[in-house]
Structure formats: C-alpha cells, structure tokens
Amino acid sequence: SAPVMEKPLASHAGLGWIGKHTNLINKSAGSFFFIGELYTDLPLPVDGPVTDHCGECSRCITACPTGAIVGPYQLDARRCISYLTIELKDSIPIELRALIGNRIFGCDDCQLVCPWNRFSEATEETGFALDPQFAAPPLVSLLAWNEDQFLRNTAGTALRRITHEQWLRNVAVALGNGPRDKVAVSALTERLAHPSAMVREHVVWALAQLQGTHSAD
C-alpha cells in the first residue's frame, strides 16, 4: 500500500497519544515500538483516543541536538537527524553537520529522555537483536566499505533504506565531528577520489573540521 499517517491513526484508535516529540506514546510501552495496520470492513468495537500525559515536561525539546522540535508537538523534519541521515538523498546542510555528532543512521535522543520510556522493555524477537558488527564499530572501518560490502553487511536490516553514497556521507560527517588522528585523516583522504560529488563534498568538510580539532596523535 501507499504510506499512511500511522501515528494519527494509532492515536485515534486509542493506542496512545502524540507526544511533544511527535511520536506516539503508550503508557505501558513508552514510544519504542512499531505500529502496524490491518485494513478491514468488519464491524469491530471502536476504541476512543486517550488523554495526553506529557504535562509540563519538555525534555524531548531540550534534548534535540539540532533544535528540530521547534515547539511542543511541532517538528521541523528538515532539521531532524533521522531525516538528515536517512531520508535526505542530497548534501546535509553545512550548518547542521557539526550538530549530528557521531550519529550515522537516525537519532533517538528525544525518545531516550522521555520519562515514559522507563516502562519500555527490550524485545525478545531475534530479528531485532543487535548485529555484533554494529556494536560501536570503528568509523574508519565503515568508511572503507565498498558498495558490495555495504550491501552484504546491511542485508536484511533497516540500513538498506539508505544508499552506499548516503552511508559514506554520514560516516564522513561523523568522522569530521570526532578527534583528529592519523587514521581518520588517512581514511578520509582515501575517499577524496570517490566518484560521487556528494561523498567528496562531505569528505572535504570532514578533513577541514579535523584541521581545527585538537590533535589526538
């Protein structure tokens, strides 16, 4: 089917309320869960919406690294790190690159600080288990992946939502936001010859950033 407005539908169905970070919150599960839909014309009982329980809390607004939550229940997706690292196919705006930090695929800061997520529990579904190769891997090793390695290593994961070019773009930005060391500079320099203008642009930016970073050599 075509994309649907899942969160408003879920809210109207009584599964939770839309929090100030614009994600659906459930009192017993927090906001770390997936929403699924089944369309039917069966005459089923109707559940009403639930009450908003965000109260005066504004932790998600304060925690957003790029200020993407411009106000309660208002998200400027153009500034959201999840959008910038996943949905955006072009260059990341220069003014937002340093704010991304070392995030290379999405961001959950607004959810991590949400008090309601103290009730969330880790899934027991093996399909959602963390792949060991993605448990804090060295960024320089990720930058070295060619397209075949990227496709092979990300098979069956959500990382396939981005292309190899986006992957290299994101990793280059993360390296540019890290400490300057010979390994990082060398890895980035090797990517200056990449055929993608977008990748080269972000590599050049990262190298320029590292020139102004305290050396860890």
Image (cartoon, rainbow, N blue to C red):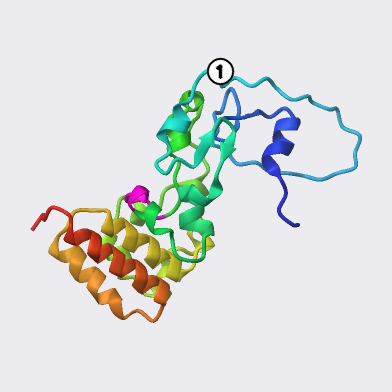
Residue drawn at x 17%, y 54% is 213
Q: Residue furthest front?
A: 95
Say which quarter of the image contains residue 191.
bottom left
Say which quarter of the image contains residue 65.
top left
- Three-letter amino acid code at the position of disc 1: Gly
**204, above or below 131, in the image:** below
Q: Position of residue 61 (x, y in %)?
A: 47, 32
**Crowdedness near tag 1: few (<14), some (14–19) or many (≥20) residues, C-alpha within 10 Å:** few
Query: Magenta includes 23?
Result: no
**214, above or below 187, in the image:** above
SS type, badge 1: loop
Q: Residue furthest left?
A: 217
Residue 23 in sight from this viewpoint: no
Residue drawn at x 40%, y 76% is 197
Q: Position of residue 115 (x, y in %)?
A: 47, 23
* Front residue of 46 and 65: 65
Q: Is residue 177 left or right of residue 73?
A: left
Residue drawn at x 54%, y 29% is 30
Q: Which quadrant, please, contains the C terminus?
A: bottom left
Q: Which quadrant, please, contains the N terminus?
A: bottom right
**Extent of the magenta region:** 98-104
Q: Is residue 49 left or right of residue 211?
A: right
* Front residue of 71 and 43: 71
Q: Position of residue 136 (x, y in %)?
A: 30, 50
Q: Is residue 67 left or right of residue 11?
A: left
**119, above or below 181, in the image:** above
Q: Is residue 135 left or right of residue 129?
A: left
Residue 166 in sight from this viewpoint: yes
Residue drawn at x 52%, y 51% is 78
Callout count:
1
For label 1, the residue is 55
